[in-house]
Image (cartoon, rainbow, N blue to C red):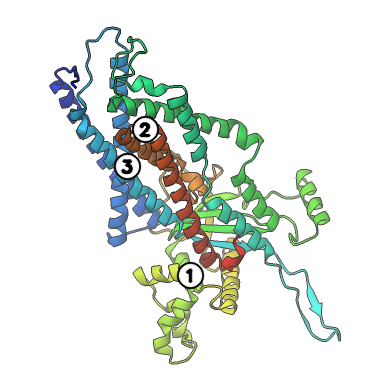
Amino acid sequence: SYRTVYTMELTQYWQTVTMLIVFACVLVFFLFVFWAYVYMRRNQKMVLDGEFVCHSIVLLLRAYSDVFLWLLVGLCAHWYIFFKGQASSFIMLPAEESTGPIVVMLVLCMAAKAVHVLSILLQQSRADVFLVDWEASHGTLLSKGGDDAEQAPVSTWRAIFAANELNELQARRFTSPALSLVLLLLLLEGADLNFYAKAMPGGSERNGARVRSHVLLRFAVSSFAWAVVLLGQQLLLRLVWLPYVEDKVGQFVDLLSVANISAFILPEPQAGYYLHGRSVHAHADTSMLELNRQLRAEEDGVTSGRGLSPASEVQTFEIFITRGLRELYDQKFLHAAISAAAGGDSGGAGGVRRGGAANPTNIPLRGLTIERARRAGDGFRANPEAAVQRYDEMNTLLKDFIDANLGHHEYQIRERTYLERLLGLPPDMTYARDSVFLYDPAASWTRCLLYGREYHLAIFEVLVFSVADVSLRSSFLAAAITYLVSLLIGAIRSSLGQSNLARKTLIDDRFLI
């Protein structure tokens, strides 16, 4: 057997590709420097430690995958347009043996984006989450004799219900990977778009059953199909589904208001999000009839707004807290770690020193020690009484902070500046005395969920599909592999997220169903 291969001199083309690669590397470097600066500013880092080095590597890989993917799309689209657009053959495709560098760059893009996606999963699954319960007791309970009285307990079911809803949202995607792959196969195989990946000029008749598809054309066609599918879903969701059918993210914020629960979510030590759910009514733990009356009163406009600030109805904020508040948060939350750290000096069973110098807030917890303690927590099952006590202390601390009753720990609420909106810059908190709450009507808090990281997840799935498709020459096998990868991402996020949510909210994981 034999085959005929038509080619042309491409020395000048590969020189141009080399210059484009150099330009892309320069762009990667500038993106990396900018993102590293933003990271240091968000985390108020003054020194280059091991954590910064690890995060810098992830940022560099993210910049590489984002820039070089679009470079590859541009190169393959160039060949598709000019090769398929000719009526008679005067432009020849590069021999597949010479496209090795492009395939290698595609595989490296997928590997780099895989590391970035893994870092997203780890960051989200280690975020500090706490649900602040604003509900007050309904009064006092008297004994049968009328002598002893105690405060009526506040039901915890509202917090458990809110935690379950947040748990369900953690692994929720903005688009549906399964639907995306089904639509993609309908375009590539059902509508036979893969035919246009064959190494034949556009003017050829549809009789190329024996003509193989070309790597560059195959990637160009699949990228076009992916763009149609993903952009179509985005438009349908944003213009029709979310406004008129169902918006799970918006409903969760509404649920917090009805349940009288606020949420602090801190994916980074000193940066995160606050969802203000403080009810405008006296009690949320009430009967169905009273709850309906409360909602009707809000609908009729006879109550105050739900917003944290009287000047705005916005309930979601991006927050940047001071180092002092972060240390106070850690000292209150990491009760077990603090007791262990003080145990050697106290000599007592409790492990907490007495007196002014023994104030738990004076015990230093830094670096890996505090990070291990954050991950480990106390565990509700191991010591329910201690967990309940820690929850009450944390709840009081954060309520006092929001009510501006926490001494020197205050905050200011403001809009983003023009430069912060344009470049996505965080405020400079290096020498700030007050924490900063930025209005976030765009609900960027979903960046703590897979829902808000759709771009990176979709790009990763495109890369996985493209590498499998180019290697196996089968859209069906590539779609199956991509679907399994998307399931794996969801399973990892769900498992790690549920475990983290139980530890950080101090809610028994048996109630997260």
Residue depicted at x 33% and y 9%: 203
| Comparing labels 2 and 3, the label whose residue is closer to the camera | 2
Looking at the image, is 455 positioned above or below residue 204?
Answer: below
Instruction: Give the residue type that dot 3 points to.
Output: Met
Q: Which residue matches tag 3?
A: 110
Residue depicted at x 23% and y 20%: 93
Q: Residue 346 placed where, x, y %?
A: 43, 89
Could you tell whether 442 is left or right of 299 in the image?
A: left
CA separation, marks 2 and 3? 18 Å
CA separation, marks 3 and 1? 41 Å
- Helix, strand, or loop for circle 2? loop
Looking at the image, is 29 positioned above or below residue 493?
Answer: above
Dots 2 and 3: beta carbons under 8 Å?
no
Sort mark 1 into few (<14), some (14-19) or many (20+) by Cα contacts within 10 Å. Answer: some
Q: Residue 151 placed where, x, y %?
A: 74, 76
Q: Is residue 411 visible?
A: yes
Residue depicted at x 40% and y 45%: 425
Q: Which residue matches tag 1?
A: 328
CA separation, marks 1 and 2? 56 Å
Could you tell whether 302 is left or right of 365 in the image?
A: right
Looking at the image, is 256 positioned above or below residue 113?
Answer: below
Could you tell whether 33 is left or right of 155 in the image?
A: left
Question: In the image, which disc is placed on residue 354?
Answer: none
Instruction: Give the residue type that dot 1 points to.
Output: Leu
Q: Which residue matches tag 2?
A: 474
The mark nearer the N terminus, 1 or 2, is 1
Could you tell whether 136 is left or right of 101 in the image?
A: right
